Image: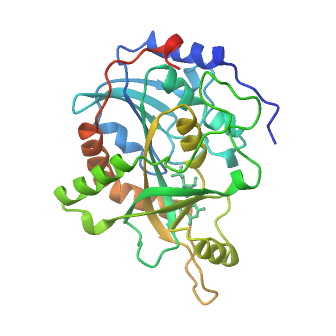
């Protein structure tokens, strides 16, 4: 448990100011790249980039397929900041640390979070290479008492008891479904429920069957803490899971998931995910009258 850990408003602010003094970009949208999806950042133009190791307060990425680089740039004229690599609880980071960048982005004026991840499918209709638009989540660590919002609430960011019943923006989900038709990838894309588990081990068969019975369509080891913190501070969220494998649910099945296979599907589908994310971001409505840093929350 890390519930005694605290990060002050000033700490987030210092990082936001450090970044804003080193880039001319004033991002409206933040993107988090899931395992194997780091190439999403390649589509940004006029890039400024920073290694996580040089950014004050940023944790370090330790997972293969997560480069550890923060990239600012434009996507079809829209100013974005892209995390090439995220932080996972299983790396040993507290949930407050894994979500540190979200509040920094909020202070920089970001209004929208686009989260992507690699996930295993529990649903019969979702196959490796498919994309799931996240419509809801089950926060398994959260239900068991691990939540990034534990500890004193910072009212400047959001309320003590935030609602989570509409954390995946309905308008952005409809927009994305519309975009999939225009990109001719509608056959690859479905909406579904994502569950976060702590990891780093993949599921046992009994765990997979339990998650399936709970109504989970795809399972992974990230995303939910980021979405909880973004929703708490009033950001709108759009989430995508790239299905990289089927989760084994039968004792007769000899398939065995591994991280290299996850990264490989990420590489194969990264262009499609890139196109979908780019189109959604370029068509979403953005409020341009945003205060940055001290008055951003
Ligand atoms: O960062 P994401 O959630 O995309 O990474 C998934 C979950 C584990 O970190 C890893 C397992 O292969 O991929
Ligand atoms: N927990 C979990 N995370 C994943 N990330 C990619 N595939 C999987 C999976 O099958 N299970």
Residue 53 percent coordinates (x, y) = 58, 25
Q: Is residue 2 left or right of residue 252?
A: right
Q: Residue at x 54, y 24 (%)?
A: 104
The image quadrant in which ligand 1 is located = bottom right
Residue 91 percent coordinates (x, y) = 68, 45
Q: Is residue 289 above or below residue 182?
A: above
Q: How is the image coloured?
A: rainbow
Rendered image quadrant of residue 21: top left
Residue 43 percent coordinates (x, y) = 28, 38
State how many labels appear.
0
Q: Is residue 5 above or below residue 201?
A: above
* Location of the N terminus (image quadrant): top right
Q: Give the camera-side residue of 64 and 180.
A: 180
Q: Is residue 78 left or right of residue 126?
A: left
Q: Give the camera-side residue of 65 and 177.
A: 177
Can I make out residue 179 in this image? Answer: yes
Q: Is residue 109 left or right of residue 194?
A: left
Q: Residue at x 41, y 49 (%)?
A: 37
Residue 9 percent coordinates (x, y) = 65, 18
In the current view of this chain or complex, which residue is farthest to the bottom? 252
Q: Is residue 282 above or below residue 51?
A: below
Can I make out residue 17 in this image? Answer: no
Q: Is residue 142 above or below residue 97?
A: below
Q: Residue at x 43, y 21 (%)?
A: 109
Q: Give the camera-side residue of 84 and 161.
A: 161
């Amino acid at each position: 448990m890390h519930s005694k850990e605290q990060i002050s408003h000033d700490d987030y602010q210092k990082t936001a100011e450090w970044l804003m003094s080193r880039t001319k970009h004033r991002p409206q949208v933040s993107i988090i790249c899931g395992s194997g999806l780091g190439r999403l950042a390649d589509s940004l133009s006029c890039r400024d980039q920073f290694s996580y190791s040089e950014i004050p307060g940023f944790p370090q990425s330790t997972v293969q397929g997560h480069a550890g680089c923060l990239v600012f740039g434009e996507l079809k004229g829209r100013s974005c900041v892209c995390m090439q690599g995220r932080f996972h609880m299983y790396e040993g980071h507290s949930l407050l640390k894994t979500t540190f960048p979200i509040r920094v982005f909020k202070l920089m004026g970001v209004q929208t979070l686009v989260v992507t991840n690699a996930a295993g499918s529990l649903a019969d209709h979702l196959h490796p290479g498919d994309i799931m638009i996240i419509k809801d989540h089950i926060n398994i660590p959260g239900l068991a008492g691990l939540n990034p919002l534990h500890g004193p609430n910072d009212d400047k960011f959001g309320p003590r008891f935030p609602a989570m019943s509409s954390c995946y923006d309905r308008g952005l989900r409809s927009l994305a479904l519309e975009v999939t038709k225009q990109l001719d990838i509608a056959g690859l894309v479905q909406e579904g429920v994502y569950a976060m588990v702590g990891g780093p081990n993949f599921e046992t068969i009994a765990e997979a069957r339990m998650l399936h019975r709970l109504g989970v369509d795809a399972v992974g080891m990230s995303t939910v803490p980021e979405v909880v913190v973004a929703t708490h501070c009033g950001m709108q969220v759009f989430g995508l899971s790239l299905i990289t494998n089927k989760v084994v649910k039968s004792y007769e099945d000899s398939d065995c998931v591994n991280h290299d296979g996850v990264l490989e599907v990420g590489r194969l589908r990264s262009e499609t995910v890139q196109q979908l994310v780019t189109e959604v971001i370029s068509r979403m409505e953005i409020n341009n009258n945003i205060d940055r840093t001290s008055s951003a929350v």
